[in-house]
Amino acid sequence: MGFKVAVVGATGNVGREMLAILAERNFPADEVVALASSRSQGTEVSYGDKVLKCKVLDHYDFAGTDICLMSAGGDVSKVWSPKIAAAGCVVIDNSSVWRMDPDVPLVVPEVNAAALDGFAKKNIIANPNCSTAQLVVALKPLHDHFVIKRVVVSTYQSVSGAGKEGMDELDRQTKALYSLGDPQVKKFTKRIAFNLIPHIDVFMEDGFTKEEWKMMMETKKILDPKIRLTATCVRVPVFISHSESVNVEFEKPVTADEARDVLRNAPGVLVIDKRENGGYITPHEAAGEDATYISRIREDNTVENGLAFWCVSDNLRKGAALNAIQIAEALVKRKLIKAKKAA
């Protein structure tokens, strides 16, 4: 007997990706329900070779549903996730609302699947920030072998991280500039077409942005609270895939060859690292792929036991939708949930 799965926010970029990946990976679902706000009622979305019509979240009864993939934003999740969880449905939430709650596991399955064992406290599991997800997939195997002391990361984040509005703004501004029109700024704080913006989310009192704070705090929760991490997060005129320039300081000596061998054997990682023209991965090539790609691995001799590398991943997949479904798969594999119909 398969599971009944609901996708909340099914008309958004991530929601549509969740439906596609559920079908691609043959998740054991007997029924999949697409949910959205009342203004999207009846909107058709694809699920494999099927077409689903969106139902209204406000009117849906979760009592018979096993898993809810929540991708409707923090405000919706804050209100609805506890209600859905109380109905006996496990919520896997893609917003930032629950990530730092001590009773809510923050999970990247390749990194800390064991944290799922405590999900029943609130029946909610948090998906990490998109830029954090790919980073910890790369850092985990290195930390296991060489022990990370400090990380300095600069991100190059695509506009899809800001949702459909971000993608539309880049498209609209690019067309306007080519036709000598006015590239109006609506979604972002400055023009994004042929530009970049060193500002994602709101500014905090210490000068860091909330996005940068998320990377710092989430890495500690997922990987190791002893790790020191500083981040600079930048929005770039790329539609899909986030890139990161990562500098790591370890407790133990490490060579580029040793790091390359460790990463090549790590789950979820693909190493494309040839020291020649084109011997690396770019965001364009990572779009639509599941892996976290690592390139440009080299030793950093400015610090003791230092390493630098380039990390790229599709933010809509590993950074959001894919990771959520991998969490659901891990729940099933670890026999932490059973289908209500079967029970």
Image (cartoon, rainbow, N blue to C red):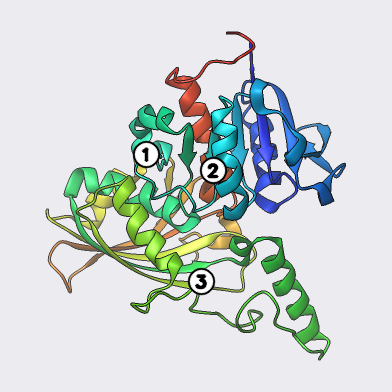
In the image, residue 301 above or below residue 81: below
If you read the primary sequence from the N terminus, does the residue marked by circle 3 or circle 1 appear first?
Answer: 1
Q: Amino acid at mark 3?
A: Ile
Give residue 130's position: percent from left, percent from top.
50, 55
- Distance Cα–Cα, label 2 vs label 3: 20 Å
- Distance Cα–Cα, label 1 vs label 2: 14 Å
Please identify, in this view, whether the residue under mark 3 or under mark 1 is nearer the observer. 1
- Residue named by callout 3: 200
Count of picture labels: 3
Tell me the residue at 60%/54% (across/down).
Answer: 75
- Distance Cα–Cα, label 3 vs label 1: 27 Å
Q: Amino acid at mark 2?
A: Asp
Query: Left or right: 101 with respect to 238?
Result: left
Give residue 166's position: percent from left, percent from top.
67, 68
Residue 239 in view here: yes
- Label at residue 93: 2
